[in-house]
Image: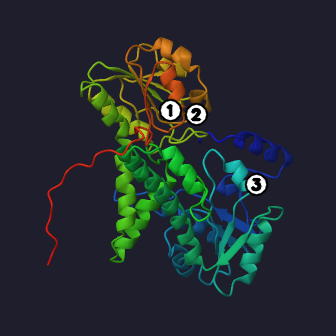
Amino acid sequence: MFHEPGLVERIAVASRSGALQFRRLDDVGQELGEVAVIAVDTPNSRAHAPVLKQVRNAVSWVRSVKPKDLVVAMKSTVPPGTGLELMETELHGTGIGYVANPEFLREGKAIGDWDSPGRIVIGVTPDADRSAEVVRRMYAGIDAPFLVTDITSAEMIKYANNAFLATRISFINEIAALCDLFGASIDAVSEGLAMDSRTGTKVYAGVGYGGSCLPRGVRDLELLALEYGMESELLRAVVSVNNRQRLLPLRALRERFNRRLTGLRIGVLGLAFKPGTDDIRDAPALELIRALTAESAAVTVFDPQAGGHTKGRLPPSVRQVGRAEEAAEGAQALCLLTEWEEIVSANWQAVAGRMVQPRFVFDGRNALDPREMRRMGFEYVGVGRNGTGKRASPKRRPRCRRPE
């Protein structure tokens, strides 16, 4: 179970009131109620394709209970077309309704997103008005816009949502790289973009996205496109940019220390792929730590929540500590990879006192104030924040003749 703020307390309240009950499958009879919500995992195979075994088992079990007037609400992320296939192979002739009802909860903010969702998507067949209404009533008391569409479109919305979020992140990171080349500030550029209603809310540059949803959403959608003979160059570029961003801290350290990382003491601040969760799946920090230890650097790590999930995930030489200041002890360099409040608001003057020259800090989330960090004696490097304010000289390229 992952750390989710407020979830334990919410479960406790619901359990005491009787609104939430836990039972073994063998103890469940035909009284399933009006809706059976399926929210099982859909892990990827070694070929990165979604494995739907748990989804099929869950639907098969619901069918075996032989409920009357039941609606299956599918919250698990399944490839477009899965719902129609399940209706044909598992639920045909049973009288059980089927609704695609994808979830859009953000890790670290799931409780707030459940109470106040941005939208609720319901996918049904044209003749399933009753199923749609039953699921609507499941959300009684929640004020959110409803989108009722067909099943496959609802499934595609989930994939498109994740792919679009990943694309925004890779886009701003590409712009950040250009900012460093031209001497611009990604902070100003991001602010300017956010002021245009057409471009959405502000996006922050950094070492890229991680977790389970965005990487899988992009990868799965690209694979699904390939299955049908379509090359998705945009999605491939999104992944390529994200992979490049993960190497930025390593490149910065190599450049600063003349590629001599052997014996260098480096503190890594943050393991989770984002603050508010202890989820380290596909987290940029893990990739960096493995690369640093492979080059014989001495690595110390701090994360306020994710430390208990690292068994077998970190090299044996990595040392974990309980505070950001401890990770800085004797270190020549620090890499901030998760913008936890405990890290951003740490006593950075004390951190500076524990480090040794050159007190190099790579801010992989642009979470710190560059001027303040430099005032305290740090050598500070951010993402897209390293321009001089003057346009860089372009690299000279051989001139090519125009085609006649």
Nearer the camera: disc 1 or disc 3: 1
Which label is found at residue 270?
A: 1
Q: Is residue 385 rendered to the left or right of residue 145?
A: left
Q: Is residue 80 rendered to the left or right of residue 333?
A: right
- Whether the residues at callouts 3 and 2 have beta carbons within 8 Å, the answer is no
Say which element carries label 3: helix
For disc 2, the marked residue is: 340
At 83% across and 50% down in the image, what residue appears? 18
Front position in the image: 160 or 42: 160
User: Given the image, on which type of amino acid does mark 2 rest?
Assistant: Trp
Where does residue 240 sit, x and y in percent of width and height?
34, 55
In the figure, 76 relative to 315: above or below? below
Front position in the image: 83 or 174: 174
User: Given the image, on which type of amino acid does mark 1 rest?
Assistant: Gly
> Which badge, 1 or 2, comes first in the chain's sequence?
1
Q: Name, please, the residue furthest toward the bottom.
A: 127
Front position in the image: 239 or 400: 400
> Which badge, 3 or 2, comes first in the chain's sequence?
3
For disc 3, the marked residue is: 115
At 24% across and 26% down in the image, what residue appears? 258
In the figure, 361 relative to 237: above or below? above
Residue 345 quadrant: top right
Say which element carries label 1: loop
- Whether the residues at callouts 1 and 3 have beta carbons within 8 Å, the answer is no
Inter-mark Cα distance, 1 to 2 = 7 Å
- Whether the residues at callouts 1 and 2 have beta carbons within 8 Å, the answer is yes
Where does residue 165 sit, x and y in percent of width and height?
52, 58
User: Given the image, on which type of amino acid does mark 3 rest?
Assistant: Asp
Where does residue 327 sit, x and y in percent of width and height?
47, 20
Which label is found at residue 29?
A: none
